[in-house]
Image: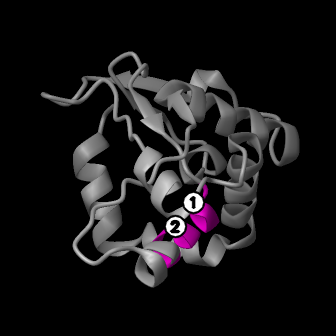
Amino acid sequence: MNNTLNHKNLPVYGDGMQVRDWLYVDDHCKAMDMVVRDGVPGEVYNVGGHNERPNIFIVKTIINYIKENVDDTVGEHMITYVTDRKGHDRRYGIDPQKIKDALGWYPETPFEVGIVKTMQWYLDNKEWVENVTSGAYQQYYEKMYAGK
């Protein structure tokens, strides 16, 4: 989001086809609350969103949202493919069946709704974004992605 809004390159590891399971924050918080209140002490409950998407899909979703709602000059030309991390998993998949069976938890927010809510939150909280992208974090970012 921040790079897109600031017209910076959008670094994507490898071909961007690494798959991750996306979960809206409110759903995650509800799952954690349910585990704390109703879970069996010592048990492990995997929390997953049933929303597996390739990283490049997420990047393009952000670009399209910003282009349509904020700044029509952004686009896929901002994507910069960078060398993938060694040992980078191609897919992180979570099987949340146990938490569904044991506690009745299932994510309520469809991916398409959660991603828009998340992007809008970032747009509505620019001061917070500026605070976490300055100082030491910014130095780390420059070191990792300089010249990419």
Q: Which mark is residue 105?
A: 1
Label 2: element kind: helix
Q: Observer-nearest residue: 124 or 88?
A: 88
Q: Which residues are magenta?
A: 24-33
**The C terminus lies in quadrant:** top left
Q: Position of residue 45 (x, y in %)?
A: 36, 59
Q: Is residue 80 visible?
A: yes
Residue that appears at 69% across and 27% down: 75
Label 1: element kind: loop
Instruction: Relative to 62, say whether 125 is above or below.
Output: below
Residue at the limit of the structure toward the left, as seen here? 86
Residue at the limit of the structure toward the top, as seen here? 15
Q: Main secondary structure of the magenta part?
A: helix
Q: Is residue 94 left or right of residue 43?
A: right
Q: Badge 2: how crowded within 10 Å, few (<14), some, or many (20+)?
A: many
**Cβ–Cβ below 8 Å for labels 2 and 1?**
yes
Q: Position of residue 66 (x, y in %)?
A: 75, 43
Q: Earlier in the sequence, mark 2 or mark 1?
A: 2
Q: Is residue 112 left or right of residue 85?
A: right
Q: Is residue 62 left or right of residue 33?
A: right
Residue that appears at 54% across and 29% down: 53
Q: CA distance from mark 2 to mark 1?
A: 6 Å
> From the viewer's perspective, is the residue at label 2 or at label 1 nearer?
1
Q: Which mark is residue 31?
A: 2
Instruction: Relative to 71, say whether 135 is above or below.
Output: below
Can you tell which quarter of the image residue 58 is in?
top right
Q: Amino acid at mark 1?
A: Trp
